[in-house]
Amino acid sequence: MQYRRLGKTSLMVSEIGFGGEWLERHPEEESIALIRYAHEKGINIIDCWMADPKSRDIIGKAIADCRDEWFVQGHIGSTCQNGQYVRSRDLAVVKPAFEDLVQRIGGGYIDLGMIHYVDTQEDWDKAMNGPFIAYVHELHRKSRIRHIGLSTHNPRIAKMAAESGFIEMILFSINPAFDLHPATEDIDDLFVGYEQLNVDGIDPERAALYRLCEEKDVGITVMKGFFGGRLFDAKTSPFGAAFTAPQLIHYSLTRPAVASILCGYDTPEQVDQAVAYEAATDDERDYASVIAGAPLHAYTGQCTYCGHCKPCPMNIDIAMVNKFYDLAVQQETVPETVHEHYKSLNHTASACIGCHGCEARCPFGVKIAERMKKTAELFGV
């Protein structure tokens, strides 16, 4: 494993990191073992944006015996309210959520205290002017967080973060499709109008952001590097061409200021596939030839299972329902394993009341209510 300095934090993080988003989908002991396996392979940075107790407990238990060997990105403003994820700047819920995070992760501190998910100018202004940011600085002064970071999908917000002087690193969404698209406050827009993109190269504003971060020594860790797996299949890739994991990892790691790409894992085999990047040949890492020869296609309405559709008033795990639906429709008949896993969900698609609240929060313009109806019909429940 190769390690890179994460900007002015000076932390030496593994090039391949661990995105913890799906830990709660598996039995606790299985997920604990997966994190420990990743650590054996040299991975030492993990993101915990998740507010649910199970995910936080899994990470805490997995790293308990080697807490000082891990760097945890813990998000401030990601809260769990009535069993559902809610992004908030209200200290009445933000403070207890952070204290819960520290307690479950262990060690009494969080390495990288992330200002959670800021994508609009309005939210930036709200977060940066008032009690929320004062609380973040207080945590930093007291060493409850050792470094201040921020997560965003918007390069304009990321630029302001890099220029702030106190935000030391950024968690930013990077992949070849995102980088062709101009900045937007509504990331629904990221996947429409591909005929208007700068198809000759990266969007100038994004390129400028990466250069600025390099100049300001603001490190970047990468989320959504695989675009929820969509870039692995020519049928779902907005380029009309498929990429491999080494190509996408290399794409992210070749952006200026990037220190680590945080991949999602369900199995040890997937950890092995990501870590194999370190031994990949130049030809195996070559993403440029794919981009150069790929016809661009318009892209919208596809679920990447990011979870921002939460909370659901009926407590449907929308991302997982969508994932099972996508797995099912790729087959001539629904695989029995997929059918059984779907049926084991606490709330299936048939519980959807069509309120469309989730659609307003979806970053990618997915017609979720319509998909819930199709899923219920497909699985019969």
Image (tube, grey):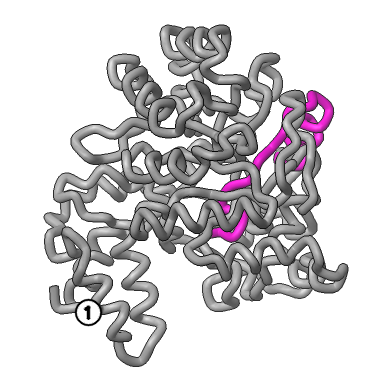
Residue 212, magenta (yes or no) = yes
Residue furthest bottom as drawn: 332
- In the image, is residue 296 part of the stretch drawn in magenta? no
Residue 268 visible from this viewpoint: yes
Going 34% across and 43% down the picture, which residue do you hit? Answer: 361
The residue sitting at 43% across, 26% down in the picture is 102
Figure check: 12 above or below 102: below
Instruction: Establish if 289 lies above or below 23.
Output: below
Q: Position of residue 56 (x, y in %)?
A: 40, 39
Looking at numbered disc 1 in the image, what kind of residue is underneath it?
A: Leu
Q: Is 280 situated left or right of 42 in this image?
A: right
Q: Is residue 68 left or right of residue 282?
A: left
> Could you say whether the residue bearing mark 1 is in a helix, strand or loop?
helix
Q: Which residue is mark 1?
A: 378
Residue shown at 70% from the left, 58% from the top:
249
Horizontal and vertical percent position of residue 113: 54, 25
With respect to residue 223, does 169 lie above or below? above
* Residue 30: x %, y % from top left: 41, 60
Q: Is residue 76 above or below residue 28?
A: above
In the visual, does 155 lie left or right of 104? right
Q: Residue at x 54, y 67 (%)?
A: 230
Q: Is residue 179 visible?
A: no
Q: Quadrant of residue 13?
A: top right
> Which residue is nearer to you in this view: 75 or 192?
75
Quadrant containing the C terminus in the rendered view: bottom left
Q: Nearer the viewer, residue 73 or 210?
A: 73
Image location (x, y in percent) of residue 186: 47, 41
Task: Judge by depth and name the residue closer to the eye, 345 or 304.
Answer: 345
Local crowd size for mark 1, using a 10 Å CA cut-off: few (<14), some (14–19), many (≥20): some
Q: How many marks?
A: 1
Magenta-colored span? 206-227
Q: Residue furthest right?
A: 282
